[in-house]
Image (spheres, coloured by chain):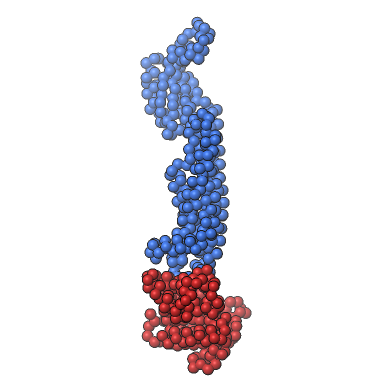
Chain colours: A blue, B red
Amino acid sequence: MPLGIIFKRALRDIRQNLVTHVMTTIVVALTCLVFIFFSVFSINLQRVADRFGKELAIVVYVKKDLAQEKIPTLYQKIVSMDGIENVKFVSSEEAFKRLEGYFKDEKEILEGVDPLFLPPSFEIQINKAVYNPGRVRSIASALSKWPEVQKVQYGKEWVDRLESFSEAVRAAVIASAVLLLVMAAFVVSNTIKLTVYARQDEIEIMRLVGATNGFIQGPFLLASFFQGVSGSLAALVVGLFCYEYVLNIIGQTGLIRSLHLQFLPPFYMVIIVLVSGIFCMAGTAMALRRFLKL
Amino acid sequence: MLSGDQVVIELRGVRKRYTRDIVALEEANLSIPKGEFVFLTGPSGAGKSTLLRMLYKAEEPTKGSIIIDGVDLSSLSKSQIPQLRRKVGVIFQDFKLLYNKTVFENVALSLEVIGLKKSQLATRVRQVVEGVGLADKLHRKVVQLSGGEQQRVAIARAVVNRPPIILADEPTGNLDRKRTTEVVALMEELNARGATIIFATHDDALFENTHRRVLQLRDGKIEEF
């Protein structure tokens, strides 16, 4: 059957069963809304965790007795490692200057102290694009085994905590997503089933007058795709409105602003709309199956 | 189209059992040539509706074969069933109408499924609805019609796509004598135009003085009355 005819019949069906159609769309929208709220929360949580993690640097203290001419070689060696974004050499003198800056008005404390007593070091920034706590640990571990290196510091506890936190968030996201999908599947498929059951006489009559399964299914599937798409779009609009509203209330502080929170990425929104449409179509196809046997 | 003027409905040793004790048909044989009008009678529960349902493949026989227009129904795949049903117009005892839709929409359904163009469809529906005497109620919802009028809508829907075979399952069961006479006359007219008709009824008065063949279902067997 041509798509134009299916489209017209689907629109006619929607018009003639407007209340049922709107109710199903509302159920789809509410389900999507729960999913959207959860996604916005988890995505931003992940972003915050990543952001803090990316600010971490590894500090490699070089042995004091290392010959000065070996420093450039060591620098090149570090730079050539995977996942390194930036390396800065801090000489003993510069480290002393920083210490002086730290004490400011109480510089006299450092009087008589050898300006070379601090070991030279390299400050390493990890490439943000490939950052993860495990990588920080493996780089630090590799560096600590080098003979030129005296000590490696990278905020081990913080990285470990961040890693377990990120893993917990990820596990919670996956578990909740699965739970939500099961719940959504149950609610939406039952709502769709009720819609189809309400029209089972019509389906039976169509079959008895010689309608093919395609003729019967086409408009139902298209209408349910509309329901999925319009329901998820409505949920995205409401979700975005709520997000902006909440951000206006809590987002005035510098801390919140510095976190650069965001709503769902556009690609994610497109996926939600498409999956919702396809999901509703699949639910309708399953509900129709029992009426189209013989 | 049906071929030639040979037998168009044939039952060969058909048995239909629901359980060991509930038998609708037992070794039933039947042969109806093209263009014949037969009455099918028998008490309520004798298996008239079951027999008709098997003819449009809404039910399967337990044993035996049913041949419609030379095609053994057991050989039809699921996707071929709609083609069979377009050849067989069925008037149901309980009408099976869409009550929240108009007369036009109900009758047009049989033509929509065969993909008739909108302009042709409207003309054909008007002609047929006029033929059953409901021209002035074309855009009324079926729920607003009387029982007799609803029955005529069901007849119009069954015949609008000009099927060569019409199965009428107690089409006058809910009608008064005057309406019953009208429906029988309508069926006679369709038969005169070439349709093969099986008219199932338990109302003896309808075939008391008829020259038509009357088949009776008794103990699962089909007998000439």
Q: Nearer the viewer, residue B49 or A54?
A: B49
The image shows residue A114 at horizontal and vertical percentages of 48, 8
Q: Is residue A113 above or below residue B41?
A: above
Q: In the image, residue B97 lies at what x, y percent?
A: 52, 73
| Residue in the picture at 41% in, 78% down | B127
Q: Nearer the viewer, residue A123 or A67?
A: A123
Q: Residue at x 40, y 28 (%)?
A: A85
Which residue does the image show at 50% across and 31% down from the upper left?
A257
Q: Is residue A134 left or right of residue A80?
A: right
Residue B59 in view here: no
Say above or below: A122 vs B192: above
Residue A9 in view: yes
Q: Residue at x 52, y 72 (%)?
A: B142
Q: Quadrant of residue B16?
A: bottom right
Quick check: A106 above or below A237?
above
* Label total for image: 0
| Residue nearest the observer in this picture, A144 or B161 | B161
| Residue A189 location (% of width, % of height) | 54, 57
Residue closest to the eye, A221 or A227:
A227
For the N terminus of chain A, which image quadrant? Answer: bottom left
Q: Position of residue A196 (x, y in %)?
A: 53, 63
The quadrant holding residue B36 is bottom left
Spot the residue most to the top.
Answer: A112
| A127 is higher (above) or lower (below) than A224 | above
